[in-house]
Amino acid sequence: MKGILLLIITLLLPFLSNGQGLPSLKLSDNRRYLVTADNRPFFWLGDTAWELIHRLDKGQIDLYLKDRSDKGFNLIQTVVLAELDGLNTPNAYGDKPLIDNNPEKLNEAYFALVDYLVEKAGTMGMYIGLLPTWGDKFNKKWGTGPEIFTPENAKKFGELLAKRYKDHTNIIWIMGGDRAMEEERHYRIVRSMAEGIRSLDQQHLITFHPVGGRKATDFFGKESWLDMDMFQSGHSRMAKDYQFVLASRALDPLRPVINGEARYENIPDRFWDDEHHGWLDAADVRIAGYWSMLAGAAGYTYGCNDVWQMYETSRDPVINARTGWQAALSLPGASQMGYMKKIFEALPWQQLEMDQGLIIGENPENESHIVAARTKTSDLVLAYTPIGSPINIDLTKMNAPSIKAWWYNPRNGKIAAIGDFETNAPHKFTPWAYGWGSDFLLLLTASESKVDFTHFME
């Protein structure tokens, strides 16, 4: 009996240690969303932790992963060759990623920590959106660099990473790293790295993290290795996240699209301007998130200025970081993104189509812009008002004689019933608060709908 038990443990051990408890991800049949290997909808809720591998030790990684898992995050975006002098400043254990800054010579001591992160995240039900390198390693621009990549060693680097992680089911590869492709050499380096990965790893999805205000498909839209589109709507209250989604959804071939870097919480608004515009806050995070998802995104990545860089008072702050990363884990925007994921997952969210024709009257494209979506069967409508403006909905477009209406509060994840309505005329729904930070999600369901909101009630 002991021999049989030992055999079972031996057979299971590689799967448990390689994150094999998580199903691999793939594109949905209509190529608009992500699903698990057994075709369950996958809501990508990522967190931005660019410097995690570079700056944290194992205990801190554990603390961080537990916090994000408890808040509902299921994916972490991080970088192997990190932005903040990731080549020449060692990690928490004194190890640098490469020997002699040669992409063909991995430092095993450094990669042992990468291994630890991937495997630990897998045991906690989390995927890793792994960038092989930040973009300054091939297009320095404003970064530290140095530029170390050629098309030849980029391909080899991709092969080495693929060989190391191809058996972990919780990996998504993210090329790029906040840089535009400005020369043919840049295209060749990124393409070669992706092809190096793909030569040994045909299982994991690949996308590209672009510079601010751009999409992956702006640069690599015709590349066969690009499975998903990703955009960086950027750190501006003026960003219209839904426009990126709509632009991507109009392309051929169709790909799922992720808002991979939106407005960070606790960062100066438009920090690159000489003029001071104040600070972005949790309301900015919520607006970017709901605008993205109701427009048809497959997922959203939250970010905090203090957390991405794992800022501590003993370090030089980047972009005016002002809160230690451990304290910043508790900023409200992160929990509120978990609430967003929870309400969407309670609904057939991958069946939604953005439909602005549901909204009657003026709807200016500023910070008050209302976004609406409905299912193809028109028995479910969602409409989001960023600052509490009344929502005048054409109920005659719903496929039900009567409907139930609900307000969902994005700040606390709770729902309140509004009432029952006939669908023979429009109706104006007015939230109980108005102004910045007073956003609401309106839910309209057919009266006979089986959707259960009990666990969202006060």
Image (spheres, grey):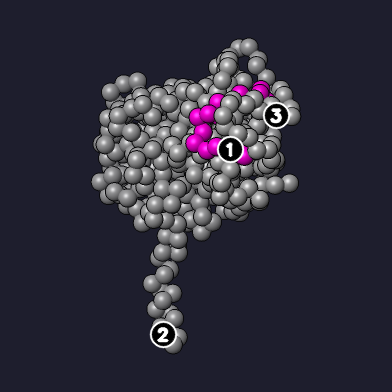
| Quarter of the picture holding the N terminus | bottom left
Q: Which residue is mark 3?
A: 431
Amino acid tagged 1:
Ser
Other-residue count near label 3 (Cα within 10 Å), few / some / many at <14 / 14–19 / ≥20 = many
Is 32 included in the stretch rendered in magenta?
A: no
Q: Nearer the viewer, residue 203 or 110?
A: 203
Element type where label 3 sits in the image: loop
Amino acid tagged 2:
Gly
Task: State if disc 1 and disc 3 touch (CB < 8 Å).
Answer: no
Q: Residue at x 63, y 35 (%)?
A: 421
Amino acid tagged 3:
Pro
Q: Which residue is mark 1?
A: 402
Task: Between label 1 and label 2, give the one nearer the viewer.
Answer: 1
Q: Residue at x 41, y 48 (%)?
A: 35
Range covered by the magenta-colored residues: 387-406
Other-residue count near label 2 (Cα within 10 Å), few / some / many at <14 / 14–19 / ≥20 = few
**Rendered image: mark on residue 3:** 2
Element type where label 2 sits in the image: helix
Q: Is residue 186 left or right of residue 97?
A: left
